[in-house]
């Protein structure tokens, strides 16, 4: 290839990016630590690479027990994914 002055074209696979601001500690808006379970919940969505593309894991965690109380997995990051997770936590 070098003798013929040929160059290959490489297409990089998409990876979701992040900024440094994502790793900054945020202010605690509650101002106190929970004293009973199921008083304060936190949520998160995690990107998981698979052979078929991205999967999205929605979780709800009890801030007092530090345990995941509900989760759901989806092929797309949608409001419905979060609603299903919330419905599981409420039941």
Image: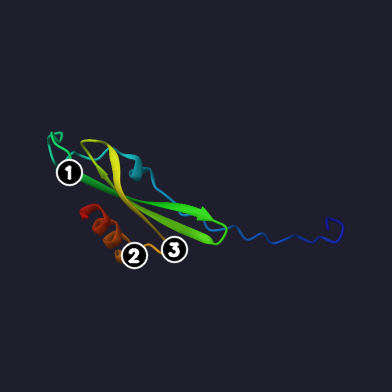
Q: Percent x, y for residue 35?
A: 13, 33
Q: Residues within 10 Å of mark 3 (few under 14, many from 20)?
A: few
Q: Residue at x 51, y 54 (%)?
A: 49
Tell me the mark number nearer the camera, choosing from 3 and 1: 1
Q: Percent x, y for residue 52?
A: 55, 62
Q: Residues within 10 Å of mark 2 (few under 14, many from 20)?
A: few
User: Which of the two labelled residues, at mark 2 and mark 1, occupies the earlier sequence position?
Assistant: 1
- Residue receiving disc 3: 75
Structural distance between the alpha carbons of marks 2 and 1: 25 Å
Q: Residues within 10 Å of mark 1 (few under 14, many from 20)?
A: some
Instruction: Classify mark 2: helix, strand or loop.
Output: loop
Name which quarter of the figure residue 82 lies in: bottom left
| Location of residue 79 with respect to 62 vertically, above or below | below
Left or right position of 17 against 89 = right
Structural distance between the alpha carbons of marks 2 and 3: 9 Å
Q: Which mark is residue 58?
A: none
Name which quarter of the figure residue 1 lies in: bottom right
User: Which of the two labelled residues, at mark 3 and mark 1, occupies the earlier sequence position?
Assistant: 1
**Front position in the image: 78 or 72:** 72
Structural distance between the alpha carbons of marks 3 and 1: 28 Å
- Residue receiving disc 1: 38
The reply to whether discs 2 and 3 touch (Cβ–Cβ < 8 Å) is no
- Residue receiving disc 2: 78
Q: Residue at x 85, y 61 (%)?
A: 4
């Amino acid at each position: 290839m070098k003798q013929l002055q040929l160059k290959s074209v490489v297409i990089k696979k998409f990876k979701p990016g992040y900024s440094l601001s994502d790793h900054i500690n945020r202010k605690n808006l509650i101002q106190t630590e929970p004293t009973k379970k199921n008083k304060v919940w936190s949520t998160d969505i995690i990107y998981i690479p698979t052979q078929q593309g991205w999967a999205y894991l929605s979780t709800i965690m009890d801030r007092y027990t530090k345990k995941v109380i509900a989760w759901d997995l989806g092929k797309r990051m949608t409001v419905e994914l979060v609603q299903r997770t919330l419905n599981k936590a409420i039941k």
